Image (cartoon, rainbow, N blue to C red):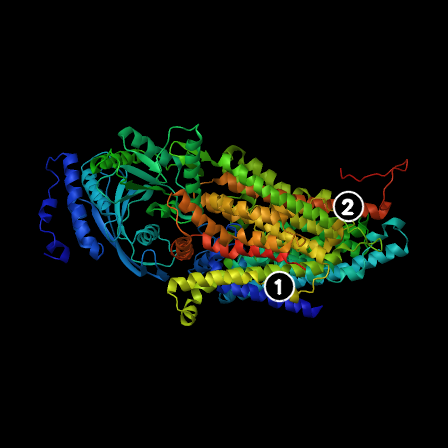
Amino acid sequence: MTGSQEIRAPDLSLLTIQQDSQYDFLFYLNFICSQSASLIKIFLCSGMPVDWLVKTMQARGLEVFTQTFSRTLPFPDENKERYMVKGTNVYGILRAPRAPRTEALVLSAPCTQGDHNNQAVGLLLGLAQYFRNQIYWAKDIIFLINEHDLIGMQAWLEGYHHTNTTGMDWSPLQGRGGSIQAALSLELSSDVITSMDLVLEGLNGQLPNLDLANLFYAFCQKIGVLCTIQGKLQRNDWDSVSGYSHSVQTMMLMVMKQASGRPWGDHGLFLRYHIEAATIKGINSFRQYKTDTNTIGRLLEGMYRKLNNLLERLHQSYFFYLMPSLSHFVSIGYYMPAFGLLAVILLLRALDLWVQLASPPPGTEDGVVDTEQMWSPDVLSVLTPLVISHLTGVALYYLPIHFQKMALEHFPVSDTEAVVLTAIAVYTAGLALPHNTHRFVSGEGTEHGWRVLKLVAVLYLAVLLGCTALINFSLGFILALTLVPVAAFVTPHVPKVPSAFVLVILSPACTLLFSVFFFQELQEVPISFQDGWVLYLSVISQGILDHSLYGSLVYPLIALLVYPCWLLFWNILFWE
Amino acid sequence: MAAPLTLLLILAVTIRAALYRSSLADLIAERVEVVSPLTAWKRVVEGLALLDLGVSPYAGDVFHETPLIIYLFHFLVDYAEITFMLADVITAVALYLAVKDYNKQVFRKQKYALEAERYPLDCLELIRSPKEMYYIPLKVAMFYLLNPFTILSCVAKSTCGLNNAVIALFILTTIKGNVLLSAIFLSLATYQSIYPLTLCAPALLYLTQRQYIPVNFRRFSFWWFVAQYAFMYLGSLFVMICLSFFLLGSWDYLPSVYGFILSVPDLTPNIGLFWYFFAEMFEHFRLFFLCVFQINIFFYTIPLSIKLKEHPVFLIFMQLAVISIFKSYPTVGDIALYLAFLPVWSHLHRFLRNIFLVSCVLLACSALFPVLWHLWIYAGSANSNFYYAITLLFNVAQILLVSDYFYAFLRREHHLSYGLYLKRKDGSEATLVLK
């Protein structure tokens, strides 16, 4: 007897049944799942049972390997309560019996503390046992159990693809299975499921191919499992107002989730490596019609048989879409023109400013208009606000993490709060800047000067929003909706106080605050203002953590590019 | 003017040194817009490693630069960063001195023309004054050194910086009137990449005009000068090729360097026009289209020389632009060289028609290159068509920029001959159209 886990499992012998017994799949799967689920419930109080998992997977005839990883977060993560993370991923490879080992499929279940996902690991092991007996596999199947959900998954993917983009420390993988064609991640928290929820949004708003979502939905319908998206059921009444608003709510939820740039399931990290992946969550919502683990097992078996038959990676359908429901989607051809029209506003304003600048001013004394001389002092007066805004953006990016210790010495706050409050402080300090930069620049030719600055700022915003919308459409659209109207209309001549108020309300930070409340409303869990503020602070800290842990681009984009651009408009408003 | 220039050089060197030390240097060195198979530093290092092992650096189709470069870096590989920063500094100073000299000549020519009353009375506002021309050399150096394209090219340690330095020295020696050095630098530039051969024509036009030899095909003095220049040029080229042969001991650098440039076997995406075309070309037609594309670069020399024979320096600018746009493996470093000349033609600003559209498109395309590359290669949501669309748009914008400056230049010359406010025969106002 080696290892503490075995001592605590008196009926482990029942699990080492040999492969050649003629057990019915349904009975066996049920048995395995209940046994392993109860066992894992005991084990998960003390971390992942690595040795037990290795032994169980080996008993099922898989090639089992482990990978250790460790990472110290820049500051403690209060949502998941971790700071110095150490863990082990366990994965078993089921080799295809008669195919070359060039392609693989991944089935993963995150193993977290508590009974959040205990059923999934059990189901995974049962499926492994069943899959091992079949002869039709043409691709290797990798059964992955990752610890510390996204961090473990990132370590595994980086090890598999020999990249190291986030500075994590991991041990190299001893076994590989070829290039991964598709992956599914399971999250089941109870053994009685009433519906399966499909989660598609990945890192930086990347989505898997629509074919994968359609595949899952079609198969669910065939088997008779209820399938939802964004936790909402489909409705049949498309024409009525309430049915339409339901689809709009579902679509807005997807927009919000995509705009946040964080992976909403373990599958989110696969997408970066051009692997189509989705997360399937089992939800128990106390309906009358319940599905048991057997049906879920058959569902997954069917999904994997379909993915097994793929001759090439899924690329035929859309990669850019929004789903108001599982059977309807809005493709990029429909939603991009909306964004294009917003960007055209900025381009037209730029053209208007150019024409105003190029036509000579109405009252010059002599006929000779010296256009070149008017350009050089203005370049300098435009350069100063640009440089100062970008330096503030760099400060917003670097200061929260690097001056965390200094903030802790002076203020009685926790680590995470120090980081978030420093970020908010730098953001608000940037608002005070315009009144100071004008002391440095003498500002002759002021009418000309603010027009040049606005031209530069408007073009900068247009290019920035265009690039953002191409990568993460939802983020680009939300930023465009809030920033374009203000950018087009702000001049030094509008009334200062109301426009300053509007500009601050529509700045990225306040947009985020409103989005938090809006998101909670959409999920039908409205919260009070205090809870909303706490949630807002945690969203900011998650954004900073996502950037350093997984390479999410939302925080650097907003801090280094969008915020300086917004500061330029603030500068124009207060141009004297 | 030495003090602002020194300040500018210090600022440029500081920016480059700061970027060398940051983590962005590796990221930039891999971008296909900044390095090409000809100019990548990674390949120079590979070639040096092969040379150290005693194998020819051209074995294995990795290294495609000339033998003189590899011998230069054989001694300087530890000081590579300083070498590239020095190359940028040399280019900027050479352009500064060249443009200063050119401005003096322009002003002198204008003075003579004014005294001879060759300009109509209403185009006096088109005459340039020394005051406005005073800051142009500094602006040229600034446009080269602080151009993000140049900075990226330097930080990536692309050998394009060395090519630009040689071309800038050629321009300096030509404008100063030194025939021997001009021929030597031109042959060095041609030796590096074949395309500067087209710069022979503007060099000859400029040097003959400077020495007051009339450009007339029936005069013996003209052909004698052309023969002298050709002799110096071909002689130095011959010396360099033989030197390369003796350095490496074999002729296999000829197909690896010049064969590679001319036959375009490597179709890695870049900001040029060749890769997509040749990726989908049928083998049967490959030679035909290769000839068409390569002749395209050399083809514009003769018509442009005929039109611009009074203005050889503008011809140099046009030729450099044509080479940068249509060459087989362009990078952003090539573009930076001809963009540096734009302040010299800043007096044409009032005649430019498309400058707003062109600058918007160039800015947007430069920002979209990395985005669409990411979407194609990493996210897999786009494909090569998207990237090539941006490449096409970028090149079209560059062509529009160059042709716009050409139009503005010719229009100003026309106004200087015929007056600013043009009238038709019946006295109504006429407009000028470029046909």
The one nearer the camera, A31 or A145, is A31
* Chain letter for the residue marked with disc 2 in the picture: B
Q: What number of labels is visible?
A: 2
Q: Secondary structure at mark 1?
A: helix
* Chain letter for the residue marked with disc 1 in the picture: A
Return the residue found at the far front: A528
Q: Position of residue B142 (x, y in %)?
A: 65, 61
The one nearer the camera, A224 or B391, is A224
Q: Position of residue A324 (x, y in %)?
A: 42, 35
**Residue A304 in view here:** yes
Task: Rate crowding at label 1 as few (under 14), some (14 to 19) or many (20 or more) other CA atoms within 10 Å.
Answer: few
Q: Which of the labelled discs sits on residue B410, or is there none?
A: 2
Q: Secondary structure at mark 2?
A: helix
The amino acid sitting under disc 2 is Leu
**Quarter in which the C terminus of chain A is drawn:** bottom right
Q: Position of residue A99 (x, y in %)?
A: 26, 37
Disc 1: which residue: A435
* Residue A295, quarter of the rendered image: top left
Task: Rate crowding at label 2 as few (under 14), some (14 to 19) or many (20 or more) other CA atoms within 10 Å.
Answer: some
Along the horizontal axis of the image, is B285 left or right of B219? left
Along the horizontal axis of the image, is A331 left or right of A284? right
What residue is rendered at 40% in x and 62% in y? A417
Q: Position of residue A448 (x, y in %)?
A: 71, 55
